[in-house]
Image (cartoon, grey):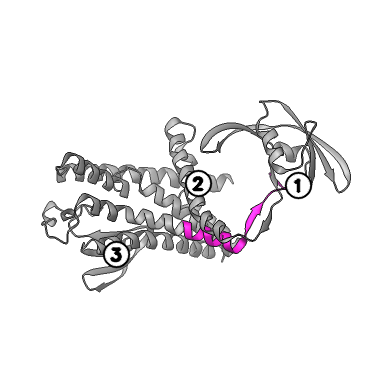
Amino acid sequence: MGMLFTLLSFVVVVGIIIFVHELGHFLAAKMMGIKVIRFSLGFPPKLYGKQIGETEYCICWVPLGGYVKMAGMLDESFEDEDAIKGEPWEFESKNALQKAFVICAGVLMNFILGMVIFSAITGLSGVPEAKEPLIGEVVVGYPAEQAGVLSGDRVTEVNGTAVDSWDEIVQIIHNLEAEQPLTLHIDREGEEVSATMVARQEKSMIDGEIRLISKVGINPHLTTRPASTREVLISGPASTWALIKMSALTIRMLVTGDASVRDLAGPLFIAQMSGRTARSGTLDFLGFIGFISVNIGFLNILPIPVLDGGHLVYILVEAIFRRKIPFTVKLRIQQVGLALLLLLMVVVFYSDIMRIFTN
């Protein structure tokens, strides 16, 4: 039952995200007067299909993506050049701005889904606050746990400096030098306790930049208050933008070598987390859908052949140089891009499997 629940949760997460993404392309194509030949959730072989008007609506067996097949567009099907006839309802017959809008619409819908979900969560759950210097969680394996710090401890001093708020604790700990001892003075149900440890140095994103900071593995006790209308409206775009910046930072770390491809999460990890968050509650599950939606949107807009970002590069190059990229060149680029993407998927699958067995 546990495996089936995880599988169903994964199908719901991926199904919603794929549907929203492809719906963006579909609606944008219709708005621009482009004929849509097929709207597919999943990749072939086909499980079910129904022709309605000029479009075939399909559900396929492989639930790792989807596609909207438009008339007169080179896509993953690698159609012959003869399929592009110059008809007014074809993708290639539209101007650069119209084509760019259709290509970016799926990503925009993923971002919009994230914004709506994050705003809804803020409205339903309220705004979390960490005001008091009260420890809510001690992370397993970190120096604080090894020094005997417990959840519920109230920190009164850090290295002899009195603290009245959680922000003061964070500021002192993050600015510690490497190997510098740290002593927390604690009020534990009226009893004075001290815990001495050496903080762990880790790279973290602070204000959009990678910084080496000290951590001891303590998280604050959070309280929540009702969110104002303004906070609800702002939280969705703010959280989505923060995730986009984090995704961009991850790409930068991969390029610079600060992160490895093996650190990336794939379908198996997403399936695990789908089941885990679904069991945690509706808001956790919705939050995970929003998180994956924004990340999938960002991934799709990267300038990689086969992905939306790759098609966008074609459009921009053709608009700048005012000439079409030869069909054979596009075809070869698409084939190479697809091969590299499949290779990446193999690596990510392998990393997922190793992560499961390791944990």
Name the residue located 30 percent from the left edge and 63 percent from the top edge.
27
Task: Decide which of tag 3 and tag 1 comes sooner along the chain.
Answer: 3
The residue mark sitting in front, 3 or 1, is: 1
Q: Nearer the viewer, residue 346 or 259?
A: 259
Q: Amino acid at mark 2?
A: Ala
What secondary structure is marked by label 2? helix
Q: Is residue 169 left or right of residue 249?
A: right
136 w.r.t. 109: above or below = above
Specify few, some or many for label 2: CA neighbours under 10 Å numbering under 14, 14-19, or 20 or more.
Answer: some
What secondary structure is marked by label 1? loop
Q: Quadrant of the N terminus?
A: bottom right
Residue occupied by mark 2: 242
In magenta stretch: residue 101? no
Residue 248: image x %, image y %?
44, 41
Q: Report whether residue 272 is seen.
A: no
Residue occupied by mark 1: 134
Disc 2 to disc 1, how far (Cα)? Answer: 26 Å
